[in-house]
Amino acid sequence: MARACHVVINKIIKRIKWLEFNEKSNKYFLNINKSAYNKSYFKSFVSEGVETFNIKDKIDAAYDFFSDLYSDSPVIDPAVFLNLIHVNPIVSENCLDAP
């Protein structure tokens, strides 16, 4: 219901802008605007393996995600992370000993 209202409001706003500039809107440009709106709309969120479609659940999932993302505590200890990385040396040790 809310999404349908946004689509109608978006169409009205676009048509008003076209009327202000004495341009005639046509189906091609209305479809471009509708397509752009649909691409920018989150239809669902997946949080903890559960896909949510309800607006309240989507807001809660987004809030939880960004709260975890921007929290002060690191996800993994940097020392542990650096120990997990294995980098092959570019120059072998034998080359460093040669004159």
Image (cartoon, helix red, strand yellow):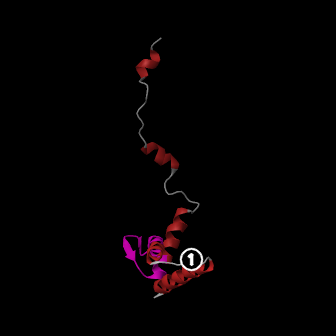
Quadrant of the drawing holding the N terminus: bottom left
The percent position of residue 72, horizontal first and vertical second, equals 59, 60
Image location of residue 86, percent across then percent down: 41, 39
Q: Measuring from the top left, give residue 40's x and y in whole percent.
A: 48, 71
As drawn, which residue projects farthest toward the right? 20
Q: Is residue 98 above or below residue 54?
A: above
Magenta region includes residue 50:
yes
Depth order, front residue of 75/32 = 32
> What kind of residue is marked 1?
Glu
Mark 1 crowdedness (10 Å alpha carbons): few <14, some 14-19, many ≥20: few
Q: Residue at x 43, y 29 (%)?
A: 90
SS at circle 1? loop
Q: Residue furthest bottom?
A: 1
| Percent coordinates x, y for residue 84 in the rendering | 42, 45
Count of picture labels: 1
- At x 41%, y 19%, the residue is 94
What residue lies at 49% left-to-right and 54% top-to-bottom?
A: 76
Picture layout, residue 75 above or below residue 83: below
Considering every residue shown, the one lying at the far top of the view is 99
Q: Determine if the magenta segment contains residue 20.
A: no
Q: Which residue is mark 1?
A: 23
Nearer the observer, 53 or 11 = 11
Q: Nearer the viewer, residue 19 or 73?
A: 19
Left or right: where 13 falls relative to 88: right
Magenta stretch bounds: 34-58
Please determine whether, in this image, residue 3 is positioned above or below residue 64. below
